[in-house]
Amino acid sequence: MKLNRKDILGLKDLSVEEINLILDTADSFRDIATRKRKKVPTLQGNTVVNLFYEKSTRTRTSFEIAAKRLSADTVNFVAAESSVGKGETFIDTVKNIEAMHPDVIVVRHSSAGAPHMLAKMIKPGVINAGDGAHEHPSQALLDMSMIRDEKGGFAGLEVAIIGDIAHSRVARSNIYGLTRMGAKVRVSGPATMIPPGIERLGVTVAPTIEEALRGVDVIMMLRIQLERQARPLFSSTREYSRFFGLNEQRVRLARPDAFIMHPGPINRGVEIDSAVADSERSRILNQVTNGVAVRMALLYLVTGGGN
Amino acid sequence: MKTIIAGGRVIDAAQKLDGPHDVVISGKVIEKITAPGRGRGGSKEKFRLIDAKDCVVSPGLIDMHVHLREPGYEGKETIYTGSQAAVAGGFTSIVCMANTNPVNDNQAVTGYILGRAKEALCNVYPVGATTIGLADQNMADLGELKAAGVVAYSDDGCCVMNAEMQRRIFEMAGQYDMPVLVHAEDANLAADGAMHEGFTSTELALTGIPAAAEEVMVARDILLARLAGSRLHIQHVSTAGAVELIRWAKKRKIRVTCEVTPHHFTLIDEDVGDYSTTCKVSPPLRSAADRTALQKAMADGVIDAIATDHAPHGILLKQIEFDQAANGMIGLETALGLTLLLVRTKKLSLHRALEMLTVKPAEILRLNAGSLAPGRPADVCVFNPDHTFVYNEEVIRSKSKNSPFVGWELPGKVYFTLVDGRVVYTGS
C-alpha cells in the first residue's frame, strides 16, 4: 500500500488505513537505529528541506536524523518568525526554495495553517512539523506508535490528556488520531486552557485532574509555559503544580499498568514531578527514540514509498 | 439638457414610493417624478433618455462605512479608485473612515481628502477621528473637524477603551450635534484574536474573539450615550447579543442607530474554512445563530443601515499566514448583490433592503442624499434585480482584490449610476 497524498498536514484528515500504514512502516524502520551502520539507501538522491520558522531543537534534529538514515540530502533553513514587514511573504520564500527542486519540505511555523497554505501552492511534499497550536502530526504519530506497541492497539483504550489543551498542537493531533483509532480521550486542565467546543472533537472534559486520571490506560501530560503566555491564563507555577500537576499520588488513580507520556521538554516540578518523570512508568525518552522511526516513515511515504 | 429615466420601477423609501414612474432630471437635481410615459410632458426640449425597462430605479446607494486608504496607503486604494468601485456597485455617496496615514484627526487632512474627492466619481464624505492618531489619549478638535467638513466622528478600527474619554467625546459631539460612530470591541478581550471564538476557532487553533468583546462595548457606549444625551451609531454589528442590547436601548429612546455589513449577514465563522484570509475581518465573522439574529434585526428595523466596511488590502497583508494577515475585505461592488440574495430568500423585502442602503444612512449622517424627491441631488442607481453577474477578479474596480465573494454569481446587475445628474457608470 502507498500513501495517496503528497502532504502530511495533520491527523484530522488521515484515515484509519493511512494511520496504520504509517505506524507499520515506522515499525519496519525501527531496527535501523540499533544497527552498527545506521543507514539505508532508500531516499538516496532525494532532498529534504527542514524549514523552521520557529525555534526547535528536538523535532528538527529528529527529522534530520530520520532523513539522513534514509540517505536523503538535508538542508536546514531557519527563518525569521514573521514575514510581515519584510516585503516578501512566507510563500515568496518557499517558492524560492521550491525553485531548487527539493522533494520534501518539512515545515514548522508559529502560525496555525501555514503548512496548509504552503501545501496548496507548491509541488514538493509538505510535512507539518508543528503549526502554531494547531497540529503536530509526527509527534502524535510517534505517541500512537508507542501506545500501540505497549497496549497492542487502541480500541477501548482510555487516554487522559492534561494541561493547556487550547494552545497545544500535540493535544489536537493526538485527539484526532486516537479517537479515529477507537480510543477514548479525556482532557483536563485549568478552565482558561480548555477551548470552547472541544467536546465536539469527540473527547470528554474532566472538571478535575483526578477525574481525568481515574482508571486510564495512558497519561499524556502537556508542557506548560506560563512565562510564555501573552495572556493571563494562570496565576503561578506553584498553583498549577498543586492543582494540575502530576504527582505520585495522582498517578495511582490511573490503572496499575498505565504509563506516562510527555512531548517534552518537561518542566520538572510544574506539570510533572521529577520522581514521576523518572519513574519506570514514564515513557518520555522512548517517545524520542520512536520519533526518528516515525519520521523516517513519513519521509518515505510522502516520497512515494510503499510496499 | 434634461434626462429622463423611463420605464422602470421607482422605489424611494424616503417618499414611500414604489411603482412604475419616470424620473425627470434637470441639471444636477431631480425635477419631478411622473406617471410612466409622461416624463417628457408636452415639452419639445431635447432630452437624454435612459431606458430602465425591467429595472429598479432607486436613489443612489449610500455606504456610510468605507476605507479609501488615501492619504497614506494609495497602493491599496485611492479616493478615485474607491469611487470607481462605488459607482460600479450602485453607490453614489460614500463615507470614508479616518484611519489613513496621516490620520484624519485635523482639518488639514480633512481638507486634503475633500480636495482629492473633487476628482472622485461620487460624493465622498470624510469622517474625523475622535482621538488624535486614533490613540485613545487626546481628544481631536471635534469642532474644527466639523467646520472642515467631516460628517461624523469615529476611531473606527480602534476602540476608545478609556470610558471617561468616551464620555467626553459623546458630550462634545452632542454639543456640535454630530453622531459618533463606534467600532465596539473591547481591546483586551479581543487582543490578538484572529477569528470568532467558537468551535471553529478551536478546530483551527486560532485565538478567538468572544462575542462578549463586542457586547460589553455596545452596552458601555449605550449607557455613555444616554448619559451624554448624544447620538451613538454602532458600526458593523455582528452578534445576537449586541442586537438585543441595541433593541433594549431603542425601546428606551436612547439615541442609538447601527449598521450591519453584507459579510456579517452572509457568511459565518465556518467560512474561514481552510484558513481563508479573505474571511479575516474585524469584527470577525460570527456564528450561524448570530447571522440569523442579524437577518431578523434587519427585517424588524433594529438594524438601521447596511454598510460595507470596504477595506482594501494587498497581497503583502493578505496572502500570508492567517494570524498575521490584516483584517478586512472589499465590499462596494458586492453589497447590493448580497443584499438582494436576502431578498430572494424572503428574509428581507426589497423596500426595506433599499431603505437600509439609501434613506437610513442619509438620515443618520444628515446627508442631502438618499431620496428622489424633487429638488434633491440627482443621484440615482438603476439596476435589474433579476439579472445576475459573476463577480470575478476581472470585474473588480477596486485597486485591491481581497474578497471571499470572488466567483460568486450575484443578482442586481447595475446598469446606470448617476451622480448629480451625470452618468458615471454604465453596466453592459
Image (spheres, coloured by chain):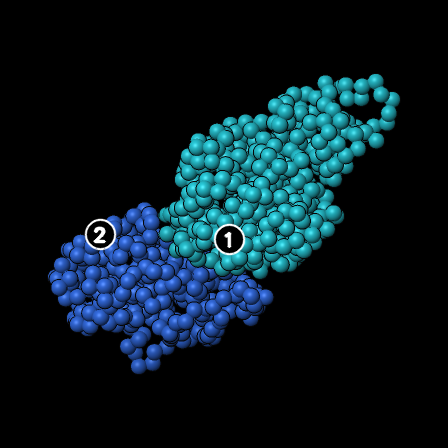
Chain colours: A blue, B cyan
**Frontmost residue, B350 versus A233:** A233
Mark yes or no: residue B395 visible: no
Q: Label 2 belongs to which residue? A: A207
Task: Please give the chain letter of the residue carrying mark 2.
Answer: A
Residue at image position (73%, 33%) is B378
What residue is drawn where x is 23% and y is 63%? A239
Q: Secondary structure at mark 2?
A: loop
The residue under label 2 is which amino acid type? Pro
Which of the chains bears the disc numbered 1?
Answer: B
Give whichever of B123, A136 is nearer the camera.
B123
- The C terminus of chain A appears in which quarter of the rendering? bottom left
Q: Residue at x 45, y 54 (%)?
A: B162
Residues packed near mark 2 inside 10 Å, few (<14), some (14 to 19) or many (20 plus):
few
Give the number of the disc on residue B218: none
Q: Which residue is mark 1?
A: B158
Label 1, residues with CA under 10 Å away: few <14, some 14-19, many ≥20: some
How far apart are the alpha carbons under marks 2 and 1? 37 Å
Residue visible at 35% across and 73% down in the picture: A58
Q: Position of residue A212 (x, y in %)?
A: 20, 55
